[in-house]
Image (cartoon, helix red, strand yellow):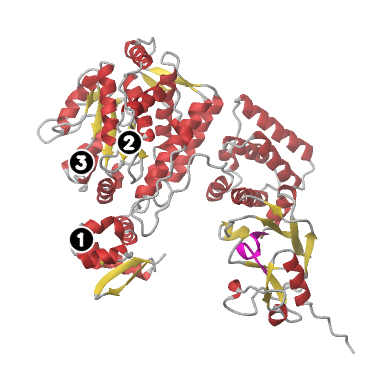
């Protein structure tokens, strides 16, 4: 007679895991499915209730995250990722099953969230945290393999960002290993991968450690040569030599996969935090300006400090904008950035509520121009666009426009066939054209003349709600947003400056005089790079920006990100040394970080409203109105509507008033689509038809 197999002692195994701090959940025998059905993720067993829930033969799973003291599971789905993890992940408690050992790494990570790394719809690596579970040893896999412990050591503690960085790198390595060439090109692959890490801003020790683990995963007879390739690539990069990177690597890995890998392998961002719109609040959450950005170099910083001292309000971000545009103005259109032929012609948008410092910043620019005898070049308003263009047509072909009516002017451009749209589009086309010629533009009665090397620098000011409404109803194809670096102070009220002084620094006057009187042998003068590494940073940022700008969503604001960064870097370099301006490593980091922050501010403001098609854009606009009813209390015509809006409900009549630019049929179809997609809910409250956000 055949002897029956002994069933798994599920109670004893569960008790053992509880002693380790992991809360177990019963699973069906030889299965990953919880035996209790729905509600398994809320089950909290104790040593006294184990027998009530676990039966002999049951499998058992572990509840990750908060229920188990923030122990989480790094589940390695791809064999290539598991192989790399063996050489790269920090030592910790590890388990797996017999055919796939060491595929579950357990770490203690407070606040960790579940996260999957997917490529071409295949999950490579996954973090399992609160709300998820994994099958635990000694359970039986559906393929009748037993789960086993491979490394019985204490759980390693990591930070949330640290864990995600490890998982990103393991996932990227897994994909790269799967794409490693079986014949030919192996040297080029290793060289370009090492170069790609260095071009991405990796520390040389981090890159060497990653590549060492990568090489250990390869069944390669030329392992020692590969190590030498890595070492030489890093050394040549440090010297500023030309080395391969992502473009060469794309010969081995498809472009869409490369794009994902680059995101996974990107170094941590130090200057910005992701923007977020909070339901039920009247304010948009603007990413804070990193304090490192306030320490502007040279003349830019000196002017910013002067602007800070004379301002009625404390707006350090606006003061940096003043420093940049004043230094650009003082440069008198005599400089371009080496290699890119980029003139120092910035466009800035200052965004803040009424009486929040915009006017003071604009006035500081005018006061600077007056002190430096350039006041005739700076204007705070025009009777017409023609008046502006007349000034541009006069020598030296320069104008600094303090555009304090930006929102109103932009709203007038909502019709692409209108004259306002055409003229503003033409004016914006002057952006970055100070090193070339701009053709004439036909007017109503007279022609706007062709301009030779025009220099038009803009500092626009607007109230947040009015600007966003203007942008919303205007066609973003006019390319407004990606020209302007946004300096956004948020919706709050800044502190008052109680110790004002208007003393103008003599050092700034001296530098401005040098720039104004400079008569270079080669015109325009080139702002040079300190080395190849600085030039390469902008080249990579340009590639990153172009990849972003071609993606879906609000990414068109990345379109001229690198040009903006080059302008800012060139202005800062001229402000440090007008006669021999050089873009240093510090200026490079500072300028790119400033532009990244500006893009994050734009995303926080208009990201919910931008899209590739009219219908998609308008759908996002309607959804935004529904999600933020408190912002539009002043549009409510009676007390009942205001009370509903304070509760997060958007009355249909108020929404219709906000969307009066839409035709009735379009408005109804968009609402139906939002409801069908379960993005918004619809119903009646106190017999008033309302909409509300569902997530």
User: Which is more toward the observer, 196 or 125?
Assistant: 125
Q: Are marks 3 and 2 in contact (CB under 8 Å)?
A: no
Residue 92 sits in quarter: bottom right
Q: In this view, does 233 lie above or below 351?
A: above
Residue 513 sits in quarter: top left
Q: Is residue 241 above or below residue 173?
A: above
Q: Is residue 298 magenta?
A: no
Does residue 666 appear in this view?
no
Distance from disc 2 to disc 1, alpha carbons, whole Å, reads: 37 Å
Does residue 213 appear in this view?
yes
Q: Position of residue 88 (x, y in %)?
A: 71, 47
Q: In this view, does 372 lie to the left or right of 104?
A: left
Q: In this view, does 546 lie to the left or right of 346?
A: right
User: Which is more toward the observer, 573 or 509?
Assistant: 509
Residue drawn 71% across the image and 73% down it: 60
Which of pointers 1 and 3 lies earlier in the amino acid sequence? 3
Task: Report the quarter where the C terminus lies.
Answer: bottom left
Of the two numbered discs 2 and 1 in the rendering, the one whose residue sits closer to the viewer: 2
Q: Is residue 153 above or below residue 289?
A: below
Q: Mark 2 points at which residue?
A: 496
Q: What element carries label 3?
A: helix
User: Is the residue marked by circle 1 packed among few (<14), some (14-19), or many (20+) residues within 10 Å?
Assistant: few
Q: Name the residue under label 3.
A: 409
Q: Position of residue 543 (x, y in %)?
A: 48, 38
Q: Name the residue under label 1.
A: 657
């Amino acid at each position: 007679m055949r002897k029956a197999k002994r069933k798994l002692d599920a109670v004893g195994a569960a008790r053992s895991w509880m002693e380790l701090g992991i809360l177990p959940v019963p699973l069906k025998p030889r299965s990953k499915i919880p035996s209790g059905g729905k509600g398994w993720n809320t089950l909290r067993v104790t040593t006294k209730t184990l027998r009530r829930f676990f039966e002999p033969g049951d499998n058992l799973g572990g509840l990750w995250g908060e229920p188990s003291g923030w122990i989480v599971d790094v589940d390695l789905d791809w064999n290539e990722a598991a192989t790399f993890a063996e050489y790269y992940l920090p030592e910790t408690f590890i388990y797996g099953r017999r055919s796939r050992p060491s595929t579950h790494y357990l770490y203690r990570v407070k606040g960790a969230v579940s996260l999957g790394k997917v490529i071409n719809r295949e999950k490579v690596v996954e973090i399992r945290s609160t709300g998820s579970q994994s099958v635990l040893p000694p359970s039986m896999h559906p393929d009748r393999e037993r789960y086993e412990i491979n490394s019985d050591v204490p759980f390693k503690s990591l930070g949330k960002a640290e864990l995600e960085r490890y998982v990103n790198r393991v996932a990227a390595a897994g994909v790269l290993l799967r794409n490693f060439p079986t014949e030919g090109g192996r040297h080029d692959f290793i060289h370009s991968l090492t170069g790609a890490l260095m071009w991405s801003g990796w520390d040389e020790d981090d890159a060497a450690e990653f590549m060492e683990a990568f090489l250990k995963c390869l069944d390669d007879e030329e392992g020692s040569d590969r190590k030498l390739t890595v070492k030489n690539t890093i050394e040549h990069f440090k010297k500023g030599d030309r080395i391969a990177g992502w473009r060469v690597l794309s010969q081995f890995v498809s472009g869409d996969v490369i794009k994902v890998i680059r995101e996974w392998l990107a170094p941590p961002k130090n200057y910005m935090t992701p923007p977020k719109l909070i339901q039920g609040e009247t304010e948009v959450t603007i990413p804070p300006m990193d304090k490192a950005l306030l320490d502007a170099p040279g003349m830019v910083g000196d002017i910013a400090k002067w602007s800070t001292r004379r301002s009625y309000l404390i707006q350090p971000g606006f003061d940096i904008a003043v420093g940049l545009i004043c230094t650009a103005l003082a440069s008198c259109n005599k400089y371009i950035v080496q290699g890119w032929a980029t003139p120092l012609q910035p466009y800035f948008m200052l965004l803040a509520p009424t009486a929040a410092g915009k006017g003071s910043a604009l006035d500081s620019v005018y006061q600077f121009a007056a002190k430096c005898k350039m006041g005739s070049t700076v204007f705070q308003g025009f009777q017409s666009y023609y008046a502006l263009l007349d000034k541009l047509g006069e020598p030296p072909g320069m104008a600094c426009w303090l555009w304090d009516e930006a929102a109103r002017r932009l709203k007038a451009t909502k019709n692409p066939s209108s004259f306002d749209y055409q003229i503003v589009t033409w004016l914006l086309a002057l952006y970055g054209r100070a090193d070339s010629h701009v053709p004439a533009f036909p007017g109503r009665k007279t022609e706007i003349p062709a301009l030779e090397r025009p220099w038009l620098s803009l500092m626009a000011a607007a109230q947040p709600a009015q600007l966003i409404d203007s942008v919303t109803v205007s066609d973003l194809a006019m390319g407004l947003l990606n020209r302007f670096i946004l300096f956004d102070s948020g919706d709050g009220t800044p502190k008052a400056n109680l110790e004002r002084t208007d003393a103008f620094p003599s050092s700034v006057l001296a530098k401005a005089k040098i720039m104004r009187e400079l008569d270079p042998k080669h015109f325009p003068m080139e702002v040079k790079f300190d080395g190849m590494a600085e030039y390469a940073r902008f080249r990579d940022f340009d590639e990153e920006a172009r990849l972003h700008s071609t993606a879906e969503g609000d990414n068109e604001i990345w379109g001229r990100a690198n040009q903006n960064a080059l302008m800012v870097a060139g202005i800062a370099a001229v402000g440090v040394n007008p006669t021999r301006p050089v873009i240093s490593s510090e200026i490079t980091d500072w300028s790119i970080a400033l532009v990244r922050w500006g893009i994050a501010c734009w995303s926080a403001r208009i990201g919910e409203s931008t899209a590739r098609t009219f219908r998609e854009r308008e759908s996002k606009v309607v959804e935004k109105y529904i999600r933020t009813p408190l912002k539009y209390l002043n549009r409510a015509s009676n007390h009942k509507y205001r009370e509903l809006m304070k509760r997060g409900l958007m009355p249909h009549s108020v929404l219709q008033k906000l969307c009066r630019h839409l035709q009735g049929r379009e408005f109804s179809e968009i609402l139906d689509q939002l409801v069908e997609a379960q993005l918004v809910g619809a119903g009646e409250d106190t017999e008033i038809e309302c909409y509300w956000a569902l997530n």
